Image: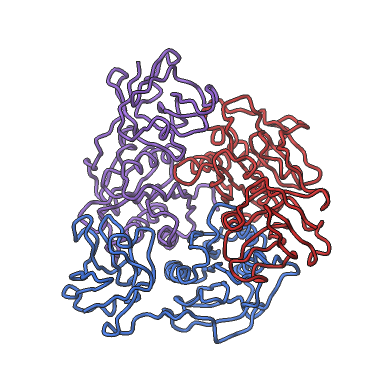
Chain colours: A purple, B blue, C red
Amino acid sequence: MPTTEPIITLTSDFSLTDAYVAQMKAAILRGHPSGRLIDITHQIPRHDILCASIVLERAVAAFGPGTIHLTVVDPGVGSARRILIVQANGRKIVCPDNGLITWVWRRTPNMKAWELTWRPKTSSATFEGRDIMAPAAAKIAAGCPIEAIARPIGDPVLLPITPAKSLSEGGQIIHIDCFGNATTNIAQELLTNSKNRTVIVSRHRLGGIHDTYSDVLPGKPLALVGSNGMLEIAVREGSAQKVLKLRVGDKVVVR
Amino acid sequence: MPTTEPIITLTSDFSLTDAYVAQMKAAILRGHPSGRLIDITHQIPRHDILCASIVLERAVAAFGPGTIHLTVVDPGVGSARRILIVQANGRKIVCPDNGLITWVWRRTPNMKAWELTWRPKTSSATFEGRDIMAPAAAKIAAGCPIEAIARPIGDPVLLPITPAKSLSEGGQIIHIDCFGNATTNIAQELLTNSKNRTVIVSRHRLGGIHDTYSDVLPGKPLALVGSNGMLEIAVREGSAQKVLKLRVGDKVVVR
Amino acid sequence: MPTTEPIITLTSDFSLTDAYVAQMKAAILRGHPSGRLIDITHQIPRHDILCASIVLERAVAAFGPGTIHLTVVDPGVGSARRILIVQANGRKIVCPDNGLITWVWRRTPNMKAWELTWRPKTSSATFEGRDIMAPAAAKIAAGCPIEAIARPIGDPVLLPITPAKSLSEGGQIIHIDCFGNATTNIAQELLTNSKNRTVIVSRHRLGGIHDTYSDVLPGKPLALVGSNGMLEIAVREGSAQKVLKLRVGDKVVVR
């Protein structure tokens, strides 16, 4: 395999319990047999577009230019919702136009968006991830120009979350991971003078922004810059979600 | 990698919690180092041969000719049960002869079956998936003729489920997926005049056979043709299994 | 792809729910784009170093020489704990030096250990699996000599478990798998005259060491040699963990 063969990643809320993920992979490999497939996760909570949007941005940041990201969390499957193709720093994303692109769109400069206009001769109205989006991703992987299968648009559907613009404006929790670590929308670039800051979330006051979990005792909460570059609330060897009773959307104040 | 390198899929009830799946993959790659491995699922409920049989048929339908499907749900491991090799439309299946092949066998014309007679010099009596079936799949992937490792048979073990032959005969639920969608044994070819049909399942009457979930309001049940081409009972953005209290084996009437 | 391209396996306690595993894979593929990635499991119970140590040994035994095993269960991430590289029979292991290497170290002759001294220019203090260990594994896969990135050491951190030296000394349960089968530290080489042995565990007496599950009736407990070559306590088509109330650390006596 030439090392330039593009990687195609897959993200969905299909879980790994049935054949659905494999059916999408089969559809990609029928269109582009030498495709290199990498799963991001298929355990997005069902229909949780915000969660998928955050996870997608992390995947896009992790994989290099040329990677194609197929992301299918699609409660509106079979309806009139559009299918998006987005180009971001040389990466390409194929997903339903339902807000899934939000966090990539907010965090990446110079994005371009298209509506997929190509359709297969036949497709199931309940599994367009397999029948339309996977073959489209395969076409792009095989070198098909986006313009040949899509038309430019400027208005993808976006959820009402944005990166915090300043500390005085405050922030919020945008994602809670499998360990109970809570990611905020406050990027590390805003966190000057971090050792002297106080982070207030859900009526808890956390002193200082730390470097890593082992800066505090096991079971203790802390604020730190997480591995994705955003302010994060964690509990060492525990769950901040449970210990501090955090939820996505909770306000976060940094003083 | 030449694009003709066959894909080998894996399906089991091993879960992903231990090293068992990886041990099967290692055994395949020892026998055929350039094999391309795709997981279907390893979360078949433990020893649920019917569930595995339905999932296997979906995998066989999804992947092209030349694909080898290794499927291991094997409560009788180490006993005298046979190991099957089956050829279906150019696909090959390796699995224990315990009924796992049923749904592929019922849905595919011109099947051929063999009993695997090849055995390794040593093997564990508790993990023949790793020690016998995975190496056999690798041999087939490497080009070994089936006849060199197996003898033809005509009587694979089959479970007592069949596709519905007519609407008047009625059908049943054969599979419930991770979303709670219930697949029946009624193929779409039987569903003429679908808009005017009434589907009766578990004392619920569902009017019309719809195209997709968004044809009804969120939370509402509907009948539709699922992505695998069979009549399906679903609840939009919900679980038909929970809302309608459905179970595999429930009778389904279409009028 | 040349068939000599080394396999890189991944084991962690990250689960498959977020993008963390994919971020490690991206880091490996940035360093060595033609790497062949195989997941062992990412469902090690969080911070369970003993469990990861047993699973790692099974992975090392399964895959051939040249394989690189990246194993990240790392409660001390960001602290002063070392990062290990270990060579065992031609396999290489990259993991934190927190006891994870224990079971491989105890079961394999002629091990060599190094401390990874290479560090990237920047790295997150909370995800060294992605930022330090994955790139190190990629370097090794790409042919970088271990000596160029690490210094020899003789004292990796080891947990206080060892293979049983004799039957008279007795043994213990070291691992319980997803089916509730309990693996002991008693290797089959010690189990002479196995049919006439009695195995005593958690106040249950099991007569004889059997060949396979189907030697007893469904629901019945038995002792047997498991697929990893160790004495195992199981319940046919059931869970020995639940039925016999077993826990890791329980004493096992063989008479």
Q: Position of residue C194 (x, y in %)?
A: 79, 64
Answer left or right for A242 relative to C46: left
Q: Position of residue A133 (x, y in %)?
A: 33, 55
Identify the image quadrant of residue B26. bottom right
Residue C123 appears anywhere in the view? no
The residue that appears at 52% across and 70% down in the rendered structure is: B66
The residue that appears at 54% across and 43% down in the rendered structure is: C29
Residue A231 appears anywhere in the view? yes
| Residue C235 in the image: above or below residue B200 | above
| Residue B177 in the image: above or below residue B255 | above
Image quarter of the C terminus of chain A: top left
Toward the bottom, the furthest residue is: B154
Q: Nearer the viewer, residue A153 or A186?
A: A186
| Residue B130 in the image: above or below residue C246 | below
Toward the front, the furthest residue is: C203
Q: Number of marks in the image?
A: 0
Q: Nearer the viewer, residue A191 or B231?
A: B231
Identify the image quadrant of residue B5. bottom right
| Residue A29 in the image: above or below residue C70 | below
Identify the image quadrant of residue A241. top left
Q: Position of residue A178 (x, y in %)?
A: 45, 40
Q: Position of residue A194 (x, y in %)?
A: 43, 16
The residue that appears at 59% across and 56% down in the rendered structure is: C180
